Amino acid sequence: MGDTHSRRWDIYCRVIDNHGDIGVCWRLACDLAARGQHVRLWVDDASALAWMAPSGVPGVRVFPWKDAALDCELGDMVIEAFGCQLPTVVVDRMAAMDRPPVWINLEYLSAEPFVERNHRVPSPHRTGLRKWFFYPGFTERTGGLIREAGLLQRRQDFDAAAWLQSNGLGPRAEERVVSLFCYEQPALPALLEHLSQRPTLLLATAGHAARQIEHLLGASLQRGALRALLLPALPQTDYDHLLWASDLNFVRGEDSFVRAQWAGKPFVWQIYPQADGADALKLQAFLDRFVQAADPTLASFIRQTWAAWNGGALPWPVEPDTAAWQRHCMNWRDALARQGDLASQLIGFAAESR
């Protein structure tokens, strides 16, 4: 993975809902560009980038999906994000080339066993091309997670109190800080009742979280020892800072789930719900890995909490030793950091394939 050759990357992304797809693709594009690669991001709805990345980044250019049909030169590497299905004209153009790009299907993140079996496995295409399956994951036999160079050092140097104060989010004496990023959440009333039992500052992100908190708490945004603040839409860098500055993070989907793990703080994940129940299997697969090295009492609490947050049994579980939860998350983060990150592995794969 020591190859530093600059290549051209085309990343194709369709925004399904909730901006998770574009969030992951943008982070990956930025990470590749920071490592000297040239990236074009083809997306059918780039509107979220106006608040997610208002200043853009050098080395990443964004193009409308519909313009992929134009006769432009393809990159060395073509990433089809989350099985979004490349435009037919792009596939045909690749097939007609003497030396076509390396075609990668970047899959959704999962801790399920099949990820290790299918990572870096080629699939023949009707055109004679090969599509390679690349799976992010949590073990050395997967593609790893997005982790920018220097991320953990920036996390270590971060002044949480100063950042909160500078953004008008400073907690009062004895208040813990809890961030909330969620989908529609039937378990939210139970969580608010739980949090209201001790001094808590709840920071609700724009969208689903803020709207539900405002509805449940009313204009006062208070209940018992709990007070809430409604946040504006945050750029990705400031969302990372929010996770770093909070004592407990409620996250959702894929991007914030990964960033919470790099924060090294206690977190609770709301997995993206799927009609066929596949989300329950994915949740269980991650928990089996995540709590494997945890104290049994802590492991039981984490399982109960995540089950409650993802539609299982209520009332809210009683919290164990918070310091033990914090240590466990730090140890988990440090173990992940010893594995290769996603951008490095993609660049290494590019070197092998080209």
Image (cartoon, rainbow, N blue to C red):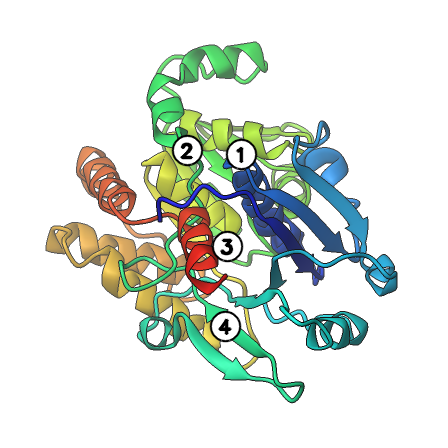
**Disc 1 to disc 2: CB gap under 8 Å:** yes
- Taking the spot 64% from the left edge, 69% from the top edge, the residue there is 100
| Image location (x, y in percent) of residue 269 | 43, 53
SS under mark 3: loop
Nearer to us: label 3 or label 1: 1
**Disc 3 to disc 1: CB gap under 8 Å:** no
| Image location (x, y in percent) of residue 209 | 61, 44
Q: Is residue 240 above or below residue 276?
A: above
The numbered dot on residue 132 is 4
- Taking the spot 36% from the left edge, 57% from the top edge, the residue there is 306
State the residue position of label 2. Answer: 149
Residue 48 placement, left or right of 21: right
Nearer to us: label 3 or label 2: 2
Residues 345 and 331: in front is 345
Q: Amino acid at mark 2?
A: Ala
State the residue position of label 3. Answer: 254
User: Quadrant location of residue 113?
Assistant: bottom left
Of labels 1 and 2, earlier in sequence is 1
